[in-house]
Image: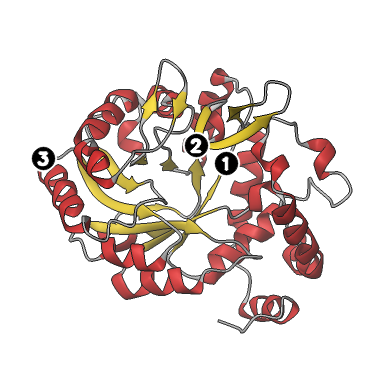
Amino acid sequence: MFRRRLGRSGIQVSALGLGCMEIGGKMKDDERYLLDASANEKQPILFLGDVDDAQSIRTIHHALDAGIDFFDTAPAYGAGHSERLLGRALAARRDQAVIATKFGKPIDEADNRFGRYANERDLIGNIRMECEDSLRRLETDYIDLYQYHQMHFTLTEFAAEVIEILESLVTEGKIRFYGWSTNDPDCARVFARGAHCTAIQHGLNVIWDAPERLAVCNEFDQASIARGILGMGALTGKYTLENYKSLLSAEDFRSRNDSFFISVLEKLEKVRDILTSDGRTLSQGALAWVWARSDRTIPLTGFRTSAQVEENIAGCDFGPLTVEQMQQIELLLERVPT
């Protein structure tokens, strides 16, 4: 397992991280709605399905034993369930793991629900409480990377105040570093000026590149924590244009992203042979592209079983794609080489 530097923090982590959204299980999402025609009213969407907690814990332990030590979660994932589960799994091995979690989405643990704050002032007033709640659920005294988990507020007027709160949490030893999970390079640039800001989490995969976000990472010595690298599963090889609708349940939020799936699957056919060259699976090829895209990238993969983690770990043995392979992909996808 090769390793990468977590931005200006200097912390070395496994080049592959585990995203813990899937192990949170079902949740009620107040930010997305599905119209129930029979009741003629809006109902919160439930998505991601049921999980086996014992299996999730075994998989986390297996990943640790194999050299993966970077875990990314959030209170919103299962309305606290993912954090609680990760805390249980790492309780006796906390010193072996680097934990990233987030703030910015209010949750109701009892009702298994997450939503959004009405305004920036409400969000700012709850940062400390959210941090304490995450520490409790994670069963730890400190969070290695604390990330702003919001797309709605750009914090144009409040960035300095939020950074001051985060810096005080660093001083108190409750967090070590912080970052922002955002696809907006301008937002990322705002936070990156903070003394202990060390990472930008953003979407990135072989089909949807992110040159502007990566440029901010380079400018401010930030780690690029890459999410969506498997395109919501479209880049795993499991789905085709003919079968993806039948394989996704009505509860799965991905079943309502037809334009995304169709676009990704169509472009995938142009580069499939390169991604699966040298004996890689399609998932391993998608990982290899992200690693080759920048030496700052730390891709996150979701998981449910040890077998899924094993396949991704095996991708580390292949390493990044070559410069020539990367150039071929750019030409096939008709992008300007970067």
Q: Which residue is mark 2?
A: 20
**Visible in this render: residue 117?**
yes
- Mark earlier in primary sequence (2, 3): 2
The residue most toward the front is 40
Give whichever of 304, 112 is nearer the camera.
112
Q: Which residue is mark 3?
A: 172
Residue 84, placed above or below residue 119: above
Q: Is residue 338 left or right of residue 266?
A: left
Give whichever of 245, 225 is nearer the camera.
245
Q: Which residue is mark 1?
A: 302
Could you tell me residue 61's position as x and y percent? 49, 30
Could you tell me residue 204's position as x and y percent? 55, 61
Label 1 crowding class (10 Å Cα cut-off): few <14, some 14-19, many 20+? many
Label 2 crowding class (10 Å Cα cut-off): few <14, some 14-19, many 20+? many
The answer to whether mark 2 and mark 1 are in CB contact below 8 A is yes
At label 3, which amino acid type do we have? Glu
Could you tell me residue 269's position as x and y percent? 82, 64
**The C terminus sits in image quarter:** bottom right
Query: Distance between the Cα atoms at labels 2 and 3?
Result: 26 Å
At label 2, which amino acid type do we have? Cys
Query: Distance between the Cα atoms at labels 2 and 1?
Result: 6 Å
Q: Is residue 293 left or right of residue 280?
A: left
Residue at disc 1, secondary structure: loop
Give whichever of 302, 190 is nearer the camera.
190
The residue most toward the right is 242
Q: Quadrant of residue 79?
A: top left
